[in-house]
């Protein structure tokens, strides 16, 4: 006789192998457990969506305050608008990080919508991804960020920050041309930095931003609504 009388359940133990097997069988609708799982994922997605909105709100408030002060007096320096561009860049990076987290929860919600609820509402259609259970199970075992930082920045630029940057750029151009009798290249100077160098740096910044936002790529964000997805098929 051995001293170890406890049962050692191996991987072939049916009690372990069948755990969770009946969560969503073909002959039954979404179970209560699945409904609670979906509700929880929607709640987490909503919380991360609110975090994105708060970052955007602060970016708009800061931009409005900077523009108000910059145009309140001709004696106020124009480079405060450039400081605003740098500040919005920080908000952009923070929001892109939050967007990557938000995409984790949204991807799970979209997986359940596409493969559970859509099929339940219209059983004549097949599931969008036959391997959705395996992929979702792996995602719960090993959660991971699904999109790159560059793609997240591109999403936020296209949705929010390119228009905000455009407003700041237009305001800066007006500020260095219409508010000074001197040539605009001289007015664009910041301290000992010549105006031509300042204009060149601004042009490079906006060129990089437009390049990141508009370059062709394969989008990995789950369920992202872009213009081509909103067009109705006639």
Image (tube, grey):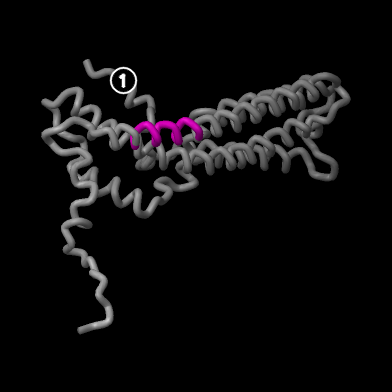
- The residue at 55%/33% (across/down) is 51
Quadrant in which the N terminus appears: bottom left
Q: Is residue 202 visible?
A: yes
What are the residue bounds of the magenta stretch?
Answer: 37-47
- Predominant SS of the magenta segment: helix
* Vertical comparison of 57 with 11: above or below: above
Q: Is residue 211 visible?
A: no
The magenta stretch spans residue 161:
no
Quadrant in which the C terminus appears: top left
The number of numbered badges drawn on the structure is 1
The magenta stretch spans residue 42:
yes
- The residue at 62%/37% (across/down) is 91
Quarter-of-image position of residue 208: top right
Quarter-of-image position of residue 166: top right
Tell me the residue that label 1 is attached to.
231
Mark 1 neighbour density, 10 Å: few (under 14) some (14–19) many (20 or more) = few
The residue lying toward the viewer, choosing from 30 and 32, is: 32
Residue 186 appears at what percent x and percent y? 80, 34
The residue lying toward the viewer, choosing from 223 and 135, is: 135
* Vertical comparison of 112 with 229: above or below: below
- The residue at 58%/42% (across/down) is 93
Residue 38 appears at what percent x and percent y? 34, 34
Is 139 placed left or right of 84 in the picture? left
Is 25 placed left or right of 144 in the picture? left
Looking at this view, name the residue that lies furthest to the right.
Answer: 75
- The residue at 76%/38% (across/down) is 195
Looking at this view, name the residue that lies furthest to the top.
Answer: 234
The residue lying toward the viewer, choosing from 189 and 21, is: 21
* Secondary structure of residue under mark 1: loop
């Amino acid at each position: 006789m051995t001293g170890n009388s406890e049962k050692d359940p191996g991987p072939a133990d049916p009690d372990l192998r069948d755990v969770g097997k009946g969560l969503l069988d073909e002959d039954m609708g979404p179970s209560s457990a699945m409904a609670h799982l979906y509700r929880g994922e929607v709640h987490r997605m909503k919380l991360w969506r609110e975090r994105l909105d708060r970052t955007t709100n602060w970016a708009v408030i800061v931009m409005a305050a900077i523009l108000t002060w910059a145009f309140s007096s001709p004696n106020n320096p124009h480079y405060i608008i450039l400081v605003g561009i740098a500040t919005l860049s920080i908000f952009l990076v923070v929001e892109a990080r939050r967007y990557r987290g938000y995409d984790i929860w949204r991807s799970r919600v979209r997986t359940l919508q596409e493969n559970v609820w859509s099929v339940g509402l219209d059983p004549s259609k097949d599931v969008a991804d036959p391997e959705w259970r395996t992929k979702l199970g792996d995602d719960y075992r090993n959660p991971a960020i699904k999109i790159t930082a560059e793609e997240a920045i591109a999403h936020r630029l296209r949705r929010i920050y390119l228009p905000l940057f455009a407003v700041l750029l237009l305001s800066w151009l007006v500020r260095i041309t219409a508010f000074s009798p001197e040539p605009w290249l001289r007015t664009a100077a910041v301290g000992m930095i010549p105006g031509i160098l300042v204009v060149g740096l601004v042009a490079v910044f906006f060129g990089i931003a437009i390049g990141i936002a508009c370059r062709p790529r394969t989008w990995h964000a789950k369920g992202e609504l872009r213009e081509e997805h909103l067009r109705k098929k006639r």
